[in-house]
Image: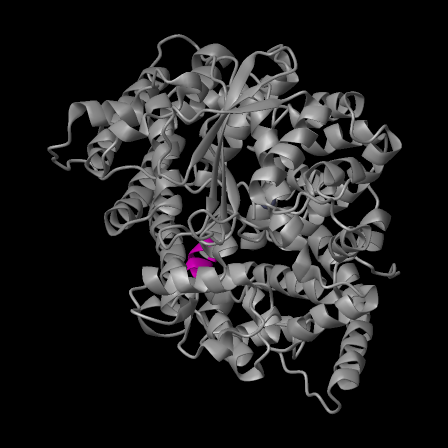
Amino acid sequence: MSSTQPAEPTSTAGQTSTADPGSIRAVIERSSLPHGLPDFAAISDDAFRPAFTQAIAEHLAEVDQIAADPEPPTFANTVEALELSGQKLARAGRIFSNLAISDANPQRDAIARDLAVALAEHTDTINLDPRLFSRIHSLYERRDELGLTGTQLRLLDKQHRDAIRAGAGLDASAQEEMRTISARLAWLATKFPQNVLAEAYAAGVLITDEAELDGLSATAVAAARQAAVEAGHDQGWLIAMELPSSQSAVAELTDPAVRRRVFEASVTRCLHGEHDNRALITEIIALRARRAELLGYADAAAYEIAEQTAPSPAAVDELLTRLGAAAVRAGERELQQVQDYADSVSPGTVIGASDYTYWLERQRGSVTGVDLDRFEEYCELERVLTHGIFFAAGQLYGLQFVERDDLVGYHPDVRIWEVFDAAGDSIALFLGDFHARSSKRGGAWMSTFVDQSSVLAETPVVVNVLNLSKPEPGQPSLLSVDNLITLFHEFGHSVHGLLSSVKYPSQSGASVPPDFVEFPSQVNEMWAFHPEVLANYAVHHRTGEPIPPELARAAREAVEVESAHSTIEYLAAAVLDLAWHRLGTEEIAAVEDVEAFEAAALAAAGLAHPLIPPRYRSTYFNHIFGGQYAASYYSYIWSEVLAAETEQWFLANGGLQAGSGRRFVESTLSRGDSVDPLAAHQRLIGRKPELGPLLRKRGLEPVA
Ligand SMILES: [Zn+2]
């Protein structure tokens, strides 16, 4: 998953509260802890509403002063002043939005929905202030005469776009409609993932006959036992739902009937009962379509992609179509191989949708002659962190990580490291919240508690959140190949935040367009199986013996050669996302059945595979209905083109060493959104990116 910063929520005004003033201060004031780490121990949930009320009021007063300034507008008194306003609100927003998704409870859920609406209204109030807009607009009109740096021009341009996109150029009645739309969308985007989280356990499959667990790893069995306890079952094992359609248990369980139960539970999530998301989907899509229409965009996809590095929806379509055709061809070959293998084991095997990944893993294992389940024995979390992830960051960027047991996180599971640069200076904090719990949203992500900014003298506080199965007390946390890659991926987002070196907070670290944000994280995946890194961490967790070369090779191949299954399920989700966001207001009004629309959209793209559902079906597609990937789920493959090119660049330029690391940091990684990200990437590799390296990595043949 991405570094999606959840929408920063805010407060409903006028709430009275008995919250302790110290607790409110801990939400909105910069703490005196290292790098401004929030003083979590001092924060109670009762403080959030009054804290937001105060922070919003103070922000409005600051903005009013800028808008009412009798002096003519300048970059400093308008653009920069606006950029630096609202620090209390920003701080409160980051703290609350992290807690609301990493450690939810009913009180936080309710606050999140109210605050999402209040913050949307607050943002509109600023964007639609005619006095402020007129100042920004007059600067924008004269932008080439103001002697601004490139970074300042980008900031001015962004503020101008934000106002226009909120409706600043529209008449009063259209502006009123825009306000109503944003407030409602903010509520819906908060409610949608809350339903998905509730279904993770509510739709989980309870197993009471131990024999039915056959095939699951010891780690998975322990996690299922733990999930049953958390869900309040006296006995049995609960296979809780992971976020995507594909469930890791489905690839492991030997009993086809149990696989089918888990698979069906997964792909029917939020399609019925109290967590049904279908009405939310059609409402969200209708509102987004209407907003695009009011602003003069062809559709919601055009509105969203205007803020991306991709030039247009047509360019995205072209990439998805080329890849889709190649993936379908590769899929036919792959399915034949899987079927042949299944027949060789058990003649006449009928492979259904719930059997594909099970047989795929076994077929792949038969080719390498290696059982990849053994990999986790050599992949213990603690060692991967210190001798893998931190080691690679040390070699490349000179970073050192020292755990600070004296600092307190927002949950007992959270660990905190202080980060030092090559000169030995303390530059940041890194928080790790690695294990699953029922209060945590599914998936994995990076987020921030403090964004780097030189003008504010802020240094970063960054968090990685994952959903690794929690081991029994005293037992090691062992990582599957997939989890290993996720850890490296999310840490790549963290490095983007930790090494940020920009002036303005809104341009910091991972605050880049979504179709570029996955780039640093995908690049960082390359170090997981780099020979020097692997040799450094992959030893048996009990015996300390190095990983057998054939096991390392097979694991590396499993990662480097993507299955057609995974490419097809990804592309299907990306196509589905675009299809929803290309509907006009009349077309969406005519959609009666979410599932029928989904099927038709996939069929139209040639990706309606009978055995491979999209990576996310609409009703649990958090990225696009509850996150920041509306019409942008294509971002992962878009930035993968850049990442595949960069991987080659690294290997051609010294690999794992400080020289190449420094060039990467200076050109792109430290720049955030202060420069044009695509231009920065081209300067690094010396030309425009091409599709070849990605196609090779995904095992696809070029398609004309
Ligand atoms: Zn990501």
Q: Nearer the viewer, residue 590 or 104?
A: 104
Residue 189: x, y in percent? 40, 52
Q: Say whether residue 217 is left or right of residue 657.
A: left
Prevalent SS, magenta region: helix
Q: In the rendered view, tell whether residue 124 sits above or below residue 636.
A: above
Q: Say whether residue 332 is left or right of residue 18.
A: right
Asked if the stretch drawn in magenta spans residue 129, the answer is no
Residue 635: x, y in percent? 64, 48
Residue 497: x, y in percent? 56, 29
Q: In the rendered view, tell whether residue 525 sits above or below residue 403.
A: below
Q: Is residue 393 visible?
A: yes
Q: In the rendered view, tell whether residue 425 sits above or below residue 268.
A: above
Q: Residue furthest bottom?
A: 348
Look at the image and tell me in which quarter the C terminus lies. bottom right
Q: Residue furthest top?
A: 71
Q: Say whether residue 118 is left or right of residue 137.
A: left
Ligand 1 quadrant assignment: top right
Q: Nearer the viewer, residue 34 or 600?
A: 34
Q: Tell me the magenta residue range.
A: 284-289
Q: Nearer the viewer, residue 362 or 576?
A: 362
Q: In the rendered view, tell whether residue 14 sits above or below residue 561.
A: above
| Residue found 58% across the figure and 82% down from its top | 256
